[in-house]
Image: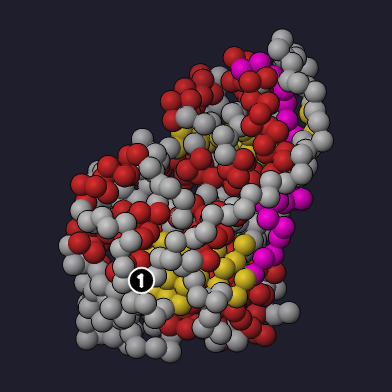
Amino acid sequence: MHFSDLGLCDALQAAVAERGYDTPSPIQAQAIPAVLSGRDVMAAAQTGTGKTAGFTLPLLERLRTGTPARNNQVRALVLTPTRELAAQVAESVATYGKNLPLTSSVVFGGVKINPQMQRLRGGCDVLVATPGRLLDLYQQNAVKFDHLEVLILDEADRMLDMGFIHDIRKILSKLPPKRQNLMFSATFSPEIRALAKGLVNDPVEVDISPRNTTTELVTQWIAPVDKKRKPALLTHLIQEHSWFQVLVFSRTKHGANKLAKQLEASGIEAAAIHGNKSQNARTRALADFKSGKVRALVATDIAARGLDIEQLPQVVNVDLPNVPEDYVHRIGRTGRAGATGQAISLVSADEFQQLKDIERLTQQQLERKIVAGFEPGEPLPAARAPLPPKSKRPKKPKPASAGRNRNGQSSGSGQRAQQGSKGNPNGNGGNSGNGAKPAGNGQRRRRPQRNSRPANGNKA
Ligand code: AMP
């Protein structure tokens, strides 16, 4: 199968070829025709398998033939749970759409709203957004959805969970009922699958991998160790194996800060990334990590979602996540696009339950290797074969069609601000307004065929 078999125009095929891809990945081979058919799509694919191009390419193909976006109007809306992922998706839209006369833009919280309002003024064919900031912009009449054709939820499971569902429902209530809905996610829990089904209309279901599995390209093992010795073990592993780039996960923001400081004190360049950091600091930490300036990036689960760090060789979980699905997302940061990687979890005796939950979800027993010099005083209970997968009956989904706000809530920004700090602890999609420049801002280009109006968005 080639990209030329998928019904994409020459301009898109050229952009794909320039990116260096010759064969569509399995998710792309299935999702691209499904999206082009105009039907709703629910796609589950492991992270790192080319999901973004799987929806971006057919989206651009669809939009290129329609009527360009009018002032403040948006034709396709991509919602993501984190600002970093929004910036990354917007970059893909700009890359794949570089040869097309379409505009795109990205909006998220934590940065000034005014430049975003200005960029939206002339309308925008593809808008990538985090939910909180999008609602603020809508309230200020900076964005309108009268002509919206396509809605995409990236990392759909996260978008539909407790932290975001209220904002998502508010946004849905503003959209025209007749539209195409696309939901892409690495994992779909039974509850989220049921809820998602209530939002789509007779979807084509694309399921590339067994649910909640981890990729075989990632070697996974656990190092049993006492809790208090975890920072020392991490330092030892980084130094012993001369790891040049390691993404470290910590359950708490405080823990992430502390660990980054401890690594720095041992001579390992480190930075922390989490929701209490300003957007400026988050963007800088990620850029420094990608460029190799920072050797260890210590993250809370915010970074587990969708981030694409090319050829990331090493992930270390210093704490196991409480939600087993997060383990799949965390280790999915490595082993992407066919590359191999290693994911190590430092597990103390008190985390045995989380370990069992992860082994049950992924239906595999993780190999245990005790690192010499770090033998635990309090050993992990003996390993047992994972229990069979949970087969919870999903709750019946509530219908959530457009045109209704079924929460009966006003969409006042005060309420949203509160939600941002409660339901969405990382503060993504919030709007702390620190004045930093959003990623992707510098790509503003003039739309060649529409000189009559200001080129406010990025050229897609
Ligand atoms: P994603 O799952 O969208 O985050 O993509 C994961 C990685 O795969 C990204 O680095 C993409 O650039 C890369 N990628 C996407 N499509 C292809 C393809 N057809 N062939 C090779 N690499 C790809």
Q: Is mark 1 within 8 Å of ligand 1?
A: no
On the question of residue 14 being in view, the answer is no
**Horizontal and vertical percent for residue 359?**
72, 38
Other-residue count near label 1 (Cα within 10 Å), few / some / many at <14 / 14–19 / ≥20: some
On screen, 299 above or below 134?
Answer: above
Q: Which residue is mark 1?
A: 402
| Rendering quadrant holding ligand 1 | bottom right
Give the residue type at disc 1: Ala
**Horizontal and vertical percent for residue 453?**
22, 82
Q: Residue at x 25, y 85 (%)?
A: 451
On the question of residue 309 being in view, the answer is yes
**Horizontal and vertical percent for residue 83?**
40, 51
On screen, 156 above or below 206?
Answer: above
Q: Which residues are magenta?
A: 206-227
Q: Is residue 233 magenta?
A: no
The reply, left or right, for residue 311 in relation to residue 92 is right
**Horizontal and vertical percent for residue 426?**
40, 40
The reply, left or right, for residue 452 in relation to residue 222 is left
Tell which of 387 and 429 is nearer to you: 387
Q: Is residue 207 magenta?
A: yes
Residue 444 quadrant: bottom left
Residue at the extreme top of the image, as rendered: 377
The reply, left or right, for residue 448 in relation to residue 389 is left
Q: Residue at x 35, y 66 (%)?
A: 172
Tell which of 185 and 278 is nearer to you: 185
Q: Residue at x 39, y 43 (%)?
A: 424
